[in-house]
Image: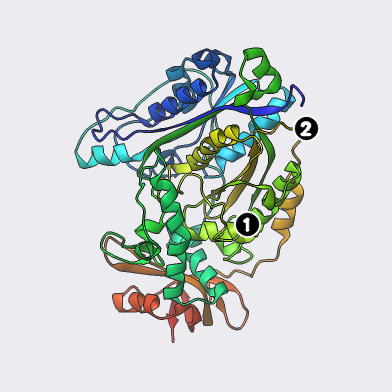
């Protein structure tokens, strides 16, 4: 084990349950609380803050869209990494504000590991948070908060990142993850040949064990045990968001949660006196992207990028799936878990379980930072049994961007070295996709679809289909009357054929 070997030496989580928004933490204060606890977890406490030369903050949701996701007058931290640094007594050389995406915690860990090996980084602290629940409570109570923070110093603001939807997709309602993942789900149902009723119950059976884990997790925001039937049953409390997902099957981001990890090298840890019992090693890692637009995907029920980047991570670690003891699959919606399991060759009922935290709908979905919580949950478990290995998968966007980490407290042998993912990315990019047409006309069939709801009623239908004559893919809307939309959910609309017409840049599909 070389002194240049990168290691994780501290990790922690913080959940703010304060019901009074005037007493609750701001987003950067939540991150700072998690960061302070992560520093304490190293065993050498606050004195490590002065050693931090790189501090990265995961982008919060309200900064992840062109328009604020939760519009408030509360203000914001103008320099999030410097705001966190100030609160913990650090003054890093490098202050990074990450891209958007649930893949970014693992992606940043991969990056910091490489930079530690190269000598570019000595001690890194990565933190992320959300305080969306507090913002919502304040807005509902007409309470004004002051979250404005200005901090001097450099900031590497990496921006939102790549566009994940085209103007054409957005015009037809494919705007956010809550619209995209139901499309994947019905494509999965079609691939598995299930009826609506069969698939609803299967999704409930997939997620019911997640609720058990969340109920036992002291950091959970929604820790209620629920049966498969309860999850699959549409009720006033468990109303549809976008078919086939009732509320309980959606990532729930109205949380106040933060998590942080501390990274350094073996040599620096020795110099600082960090006990080797605190060290956790990144044995394998990789990243890959799908074809970013949903319209361009090879198909809508699988993930070549998860399959490719996880395989590269396993090869780097010298391990296989059978060697893994602890698993956390990114779980924003059932389709994210199903697609990842299929890509990994992992049973949905694997006795090891598929979540360490309880998952985004039940533990909580703190924006782009969820996977930091999974890693922080894994670390004490790995320290307690150094022979164990943990697999963490992270997913950003609309099954768009993926990152994988394989961790263990078992020391790394030889030199830490990650491989470029350029080859696997080129292979994914080169996979043939169906031709896409923006102005389709003629006989058509349904590839997948969803029905979107307001608080109580269906309001719109989105169809991704194929032209019968050319097999070109298109996106369209259906008629928005309630009879049509409810029929799409009650009948097996996946078997429907019909016609699509185009006008004024908008497409309409009508079943026959």
- Residue at point 43% right, 25% down? 32
Q: Is residue 116 visible?
A: yes
- The quarter of the displayed image where residue 2 is located: top right
Which residue is disc 1 drawn over?
291
**Front-lying residue, 500 or 389:** 389
- Residue at point 52% right, 45% down? 102
**Front-lying residue, 453 or 49:** 49
Local SS, label 1: loop
- Residue at point 34% right, 67% down? 233
Position of the N terminus, as image quadrant, is top right
Q: Is residue 444 above or below residue 354?
A: below
Q: Is residue 405 above or below residue 245?
A: above
Q: Is residue 288 left or right of residue 447?
A: right
Numbered tag placed on residue 413 in the rendering? 2
**Front-lying residue, 309 or 421:** 309
- Residue at point 62% right, 14% down? 273
């Amino acid at each position: 084990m070389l002194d240049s070997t990168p290691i994780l030496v501290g990790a922690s989580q913080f959940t703010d349950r304060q019901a009074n928004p005037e007493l609750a933490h701001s987003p950067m204060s939540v991150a700072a609380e998690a960061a302070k606890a992560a520093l304490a977890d190293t065993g050498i406490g606050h004195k490590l803050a002065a050693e931090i030369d790189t501090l990265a903050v995961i982008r919060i949701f309200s900064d992840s869209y062109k328009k604020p996701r939760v519009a408030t007058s509360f203000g914001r931290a103008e320099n999030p990494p410097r705001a966190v640094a100030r609160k913990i007594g650090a003054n890093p050389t490098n202050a990074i504000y990450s891209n958007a995406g649930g893949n970014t915690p693992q992606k940043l860990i991969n990056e910091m590991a490489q930079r530690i090996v190269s000598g570019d980084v000595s001690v890194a602290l990565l933190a992320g948070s959300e305080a969306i629940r507090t913002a919502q409570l304040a807005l509902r109570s007409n309470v004004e908060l002051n979250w404005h923070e200005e901090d001097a110093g450099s900031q590497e603001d990496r921006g939102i990142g790549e566009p994940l939807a085209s103007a054409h997709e957005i015009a037809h309602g494919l705007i956010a993850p809550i619209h995209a993942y139901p499309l994947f789900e019905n494509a999965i149902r079609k691939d598995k040949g299930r009826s609506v009723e069969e698939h609803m119950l299967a999704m409930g059976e997939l997620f019911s064990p997640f609720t058990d884990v969340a109920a036992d997790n002291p950091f959970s925001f929604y820790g209620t045990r629920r049966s498969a039937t309860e999850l699959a049953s549409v009720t006033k409390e468990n109303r549809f968001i976008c078919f086939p997902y009732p509320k309980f099957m959606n990532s729930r981001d109205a949380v106040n949660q933060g998590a942080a990890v501390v990274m350094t090298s073996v040599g620096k840890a020795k110099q600082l006196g960090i006990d080797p019992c605190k060290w956790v090693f990144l044995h394998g890692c990789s990243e890959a992207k799908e074809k970013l637009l949903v319209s361009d995907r090879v198909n809508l029920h699988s993930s070549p990028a998860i399959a490719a980047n996880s395989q590269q991570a396993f090869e780097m670690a010298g391990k296989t799936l059978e060697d893994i003891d602890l698993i956390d699959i990114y779980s924003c919606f059932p389709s994210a878990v199903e697609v990842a399991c299929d890509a990994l060759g992992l049973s949905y009922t694997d006795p090891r379980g598929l979540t360490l935290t309880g998952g985004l709908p039940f533990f909580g979905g703190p924006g782009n930072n969820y996977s930091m919580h999974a890693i922080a949950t894994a670390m004490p478990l790995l320290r307690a049994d150094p022979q164990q290995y943990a697999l963490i998968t992270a997913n950003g966007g609309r099954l768009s961007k993926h990152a994988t980490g394989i961790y263990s407290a078992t020391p790394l042998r030889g030199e830490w070295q990650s491989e470029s993912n350029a080859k696997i990315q080129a292979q994914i990019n080169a996979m043939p996709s169906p031709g896409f047409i923006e102005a389709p006309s003629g006989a058509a069939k349904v590839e997948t679809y969803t029905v979107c709801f307001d608080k109580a009623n269906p309001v719109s239908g989105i169809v991704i289909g194929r032209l019968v004559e050319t097999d070109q893919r298109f996106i369209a809307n259906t008629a928005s009357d309630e009879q049509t939309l409810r029929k799409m959910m009650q009948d097996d609309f996946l078997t429907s054929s019909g016609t699509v017409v185009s006008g004024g840049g908008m497409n309409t599909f009508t079943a026959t």
